[in-house]
Amino acid sequence: MSKEKGLETICITTGPTEVGDYVTLNIGPIHPAMHGTLRVITQTDGETVISAKPEIGYLHRGVEKLGENLTYSQFLPMTDRLNYCSAICNNVAYEMAVEKLLGIEVPPKAQLIRMIMMELARIADHQVCVGILGVDLGALTPFFYLIIQREEIYEIFEWHHGARLTNSMGAIGGVEADLPDRFHEKWPKMRDTIRRANDETDSLLTHNRIWMDRTIGVNAFCGDDALDWGFTGPMLRACGVRRDLRKDEPYLMYDKVDFEVPVGKHGDVFDRYMVRMLEMEESVKIIDQAYALYKELPDDAPLMKKMPKIIRPPEGQIYHAIESPNGELGFFIKSDGSDKPYRIKIRPPCYMVYQAFEDLVKGEMISDLIACLSSLNVIAGELDR
Amino acid sequence: MSLKERIEGILGRDLLELTEFRGDICVEIPKNRVIQALTMLKEEAGFDFLSDLFGIDNLDLYTKAKKKKKKSEDDEAQEPEEKGPPPPRFEVIYLLLSLSTNERVMVKVRVPEDDLELPSITGLWRAANWPEREVFDMFGVRFKGHPNLRRLLMWDEFQDHPLRKDYPLEGKGEERHLNYDIA
């Protein structure tokens, strides 16, 4: 009963029901077109969206509260469950935040392995996003080209640390294992297959008339608005703002590799798609360079810094952010000197993007709302924490 | 001019405390000057991007400090407990970022338990919309002037504020009182 009551109150607050003959359409939280457990309550006039109120919290597990009751090392597997499309980026972001709190720097070999794995995760994340965007707009074929490649990437993850989806890669102070032997044979081949899959996707979608009609000019967004709303990552770059934490606040060894930051112009669905496609190319370039740097290091170079069994950082608070596939992923940690963090705050990138959802889709068609949602790449696990 | 000096120069008397830890600068500003101080930081210091906004409950920090003190005092003569207003329980932190210089600063506001209200900064940055709702949801700090101050992650009928330190990890069993019709 109370659920119905809740829906009623929300619908009344959404807009001018009494004015016109608007239809309230509730999409989600369980709906094939909704990614994860998202819910949008829309008011529609025919097929035009008059208002769209996102409701979140359906996947809220209280990760931050749990973090206050777990030790620093125990919290690492929790970070997998944030953005499960690129769990490694979450792992590394958290590890680096704790390392900053401790004031240590990990050995160069561990940094390069982290970089290689993170870029592979970025490619996998973008492949899912682009593939699903295609599926939602009716193009099923590219999804298969991309998902086969993602499978190969997951194979590498499995060789390296044993897990495919919830990676929990590395530890505070470094990484647990060297690159697997099979990686050295696999990578030169895989680089080409990833590029080929991207080319196939590109040839199927980019100049496709239907694709262009469905994406160009849909949800165009300007850069100033995007900054005001706190956008980061591909969403912001699609709006024409060149900002990438890998360039602007370099961490690991990103300042030693050479890569471009692709930017769009109009901030529409097409630009977001193109930015992601080009970023995959750049990621392949980064992995190549990081791998070359890795090759220069001796085989017995250390992977882990010597760490105490129980990590007790000094009192203090830090914030550390990295560029995850979706944008700025930051961890704020406040320590009270004990073995558990006093407060952990996660800054998920798609949280800021999704709160502007109404601004993005107002006045568009319902079918464009679905296109918009797919192109945002909102991950419910990260959004609700 | 270093960032510290610049912030000191711009905030002037509004700067209560400036701490630095591992290169992260944290400034404390008075509660009644939040909008003015943040506007100054945005417009004069160039911190034009709101990265995040969140709350902290300091309850455990104070109880721990008290316990420590008591332990050390137990050996000596027992002193009467100090009187006076307790330190403000909550903190709200604004994470600001300058897009031109890539510098970050944390702005801290202390919120006492008996006056859980802050002005909303949604007028300065629209990005503060959901974070402010989340702070209200999780800590109970109300933001005056917020366009839609409802709970964000917990459901609307929920009574408590789960990220407070006195809220138990396993919850208080609220979900049992939800009566969904399960057919």
Image (cartoon, grey):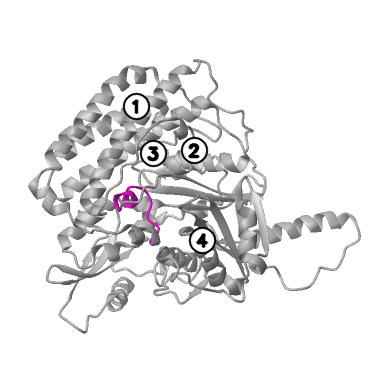
Mark 2 or mark 1: which is in front? 2
Q: Earlier in the sequence, mark 2 or mark 1?
A: 1
Of circles 4 and 2, the one toward us is 2
Instruction: State the residue position of label 4.
Output: B54
Which part of the image, by quadrant, shows the N terminus of chain A?
bottom left
* Of residues B47 and B79, the one drawn nearer to the viewer in this rendering: B47
Question: Which chain letter matches label 2?
Answer: A
**In this figure, which residue is indicated by the disc labeled 1?**
A156
Count the labels in the image: 4
Disc 2: which residue = A251
Q: Which residue is mark 3?
A: A166
- Same-chain check, marks 4 and 2: no
Q: Secondary structure at mark 2?
A: loop
Disc 2/disc 1 C-alpha distance (Å): 23 Å
Task: Identify residue type, mark 2.
Answer: Tyr
Which secondary structure lies at badge 3? Answer: loop
The furthest residue to the front: B1
Q: CA distance from mark 3 to mark 4?
A: 27 Å
Q: Position of residue A341 (x, y in %)?
A: 59, 49
Q: Is residue A53 above or below residue A162?
A: below
Extent of the magenta region: A229-239
Marks 3 and 2, how far apart at CA = 23 Å
Query: Between tags 3 and 4, which lies in front?
Result: 4
Question: Is disc 1 on the same chain as disc 2?
Answer: yes
For the residues labelled 1 and 4, say whether their Cβ atoms are less than 8 Å apart.
no
